[in-house]
Amino acid sequence: MAKSFKKALKEEYQRLKKAFDKMVNPKKDQAMPSLVLQPVKNRRFPGN
C-alpha cells in the first residue's frame, strides 16, 4: 500500500508541476495580446 500511495503522490506532483510550468512560462507560439495603433487622419470639419 505504501508503494501505491507514493506512486499516486508522485504522479500528482508531476501533473501539478506541468500545470505550474505552463502558467509561469507560456510558450512563445501562443498569441500575445498586442495593441495595434491606427494612423489618425487630420480632417477639417466645417465650422472649425
Image (tube, helix red, strand yellow):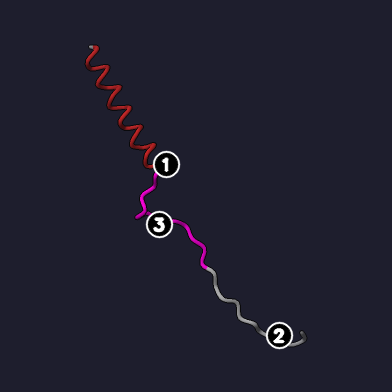
Query: Amino acid under label 1?
Result: Val
Q: Amino acid at mark 2?
A: Phe
Q: Secondary structure at mark 2?
A: loop
* Magenta span contains residue 29: yes
- Image: 40 above or below 32: below
Residue lying at the far bottom of the rendered structure: 46
Disc 2 designates what residue? 45
Q: Quadrant of residue 11?
A: top left
Q: Residue at x 24, y 21 (%)?
A: 7
Residue at position x 28%, y 24% in the image: 10
Q: Label 1 belongs to which residue?
A: 24
Depth check, mark 3 against mark 1: the one in front is 1
Quarter of the view holding residue 12: top left
In the rendered view, tell whether residue 42 sits above or below residue 6. below
Q: Residues within 10 Å of mark 3 (few under 14, many from 20)?
A: few
What is the span of residues highlighted in magenta in the rendered image?
A: 24-36
Question: Is residue 1 shown left or right of residue 38?
Answer: left
Instruction: Determine which residue is flagged by label 3.
Output: 31
Queried whether the magenta region covers residue 40, the answer comes back as no
